[in-house]
Image: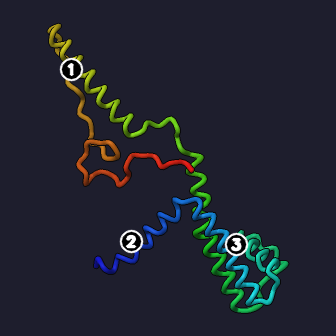
Amino acid sequence: MELVLLPFRWIYRALVWFANSPRTLITSYLLMIVVAGVIYGEVEQRSPADAVWWAVVTASTVGYGDISPTTWAGRTLAALLISTMVLLVIPLITAHFASRLIVDDDAFEHEEQEQLKADVRRMRALLEELATRQGIDLPPLPPTPPVSGPGSAAPPVARSGRSGRRRPRW
């Protein structure tokens, strides 16, 4: 079973790498336009300028209709270009830039969270020591549900796969 899943893991890792690299996304977009334009120009006997224009219009799904394929090879190329761009490349580019706009720059880093937790523990210990000196009984801490995620004390199996670190901006 492990052997059957191996190609899917490779594909998944490649997609993650592909999706997290804006340079790769933009480069692949431009490369697909040029390659599709060259192939279209050869298959449909068009000039390079017309072929690249067709590829841009087709990939963006605008489809002016001024240039369209007449052969089955050209139509197949158009279907592949549209499918790849609409289902993979353009959504990944959009999602990447949208995720950059949504990032909360005020969020605590993992190290800051750990420092805050340590400070709270230290304050609790000092408060308990002070209460003991004064003869005051502190109420017990309310039970807290286990937390799983970056920086939590949950067992490693229950943690998510994220490291808790931000990715560098490009």
Indicate which disc, 3 or 2, sits on the residue closer to the N terminus. 2
> Alpha-carbon neighbours of circle 1 within 10 Å: few (<14), some, or many (≥20)?
few
Secondary structure at badge 3 equals helix
On residue 139, the disc is: 1
Q: CA gap, disc 1 to disc 2?
A: 51 Å
Q: Residue at x 73, y 76 (%)?
A: 55
Residue 17 vertical position relative to residue 42 in the rendered view, above or below: above
The residue at which mark 2 appears reads as 9
Tell me residue 64's x, y (percent): 82, 73
Q: Amino acid at mark 1?
A: Pro
Compare residues 163 and 137 and report the one nearer the observer.
163
Tell me residue 67's x, y (percent): 82, 80
Quarter holding the N terminus?
bottom left
The residue at which mark 3 appears reads as 59
> Alpha-carbon neighbours of circle 2 within 10 Å: few (<14), some, or many (≥20)?
few
> Alpha-carbon neighbours of circle 3 within 10 Å: few (<14), some, or many (≥20)?
many
Indicate which disc, 1 or 2, sits on the residue closer to the N terminus. 2
